[in-house]
Image: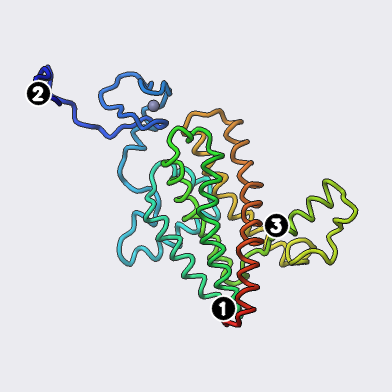
Amino acid sequence: MTDGAPAPLSAPVADTGLRCPRCRYNLTGLAQPRCPECGTVFDWEDVRRAADPTPTIAFERARGRHRVPAFLWTALTVLFAPWVFARQVVRRARLRSALGFAALCLAATALSLLFDWAPDVYVVWMVTAAAYLPVQALALSLLDVPGWSQPLRALRFWLIVGGYTCAVMVPEIYTGPPLLTFRDLWLQLDWHFIGTPGAAPTAQWRFAPTLWEGSLDALIGWSQLGLWLAGPACCMYARWRTARQPRLRSAVAALLVVPAGLGLYAVAVEFVGLPLGVALNRWNLF
Ligand SMILES: [Zn+2]
């Protein structure tokens, strides 16, 4: 307040922490459930819940040795109840905790070395995952249209989601990551939907029959991809709903996460994982 400004007539109201779910405008002292800044009509109950500082994600609530069961509980929630995780993460989540969670998942994946996975596969896997995560956050921020007004907040949110959805690496310790390359994916799409005769996915593909022929490996691989993508898709739905978008529009946005995630993952395997694997073999580092 500048000198000479009139003294307030009443005592200043303490900040209640209530914020507009869309633009974060301070709603302290407002009577109507409508944001004076962006015009969003909100539900007081949702706004109060969002202002509650108690962490909603088990991994963020736990302290000390309780973090071990909390890590497992959070991983199980992300993988098998992604809609619950989505409701938690839109309400409150910390970037630092999400990155810590991701680091734990990446570290736990080192156990895969006990299951005959060669060290070069492990290195390729970790580097590909680390390169993929920021790209996924950028792509999902672009898809997150209601979040465009606050791009940095959106990017932070999708980095958090990317961090927690690293939970899918834990079951992959035994089976390894699904080997989906962009070339194999493109051959399949070309063959089935465009029908280019030269695209018959025979000896051209890289990892047949890993994901493309009826086998247990293929079932496991697609299940892993499904478990993983259900997380960001549910988060997209919850985020659009929090921004008061209609159900149908939110569901379409959530469904778009699946092809976007698959495509980006395949690009990461093709252009980061494969060249790195070839280079490590050539240099005989392992
Ligand atoms: Zn607002």
Q: Which residue is mark 2?
A: 3
Q: Nearer the viewer, residue 84 or 50?
A: 50
Which of the image's four quarters has the C terminus?
A: bottom right
Q: Specify the label residue 119 is tagged with.
A: 1
Q: Specify the label residue 182 is tagged with.
A: 3
Q: Which residue type carries mark 1?
A: Pro
Whole-number angstrom distance, CA of label 2 to CA of label 3:
64 Å
Q: Which residue type carries mark 3?
A: Phe
13 with respect to 202 (left or right): left
Name the quadrant where ligand 1 sits: top left
Secondary element under disc 1, as helix, strand or loop, is helix
Residue 202 location (% of width, % of height): 85, 64
Residue 158 location (% of width, % of height): 48, 47
Mark 2 sits near ligand 1, with its Cβ under 8 Å away: no
Q: Nearer the viewer, residue 200 or 254?
A: 200
Mark closest to the chain's N terminus, 2 or 1: 2
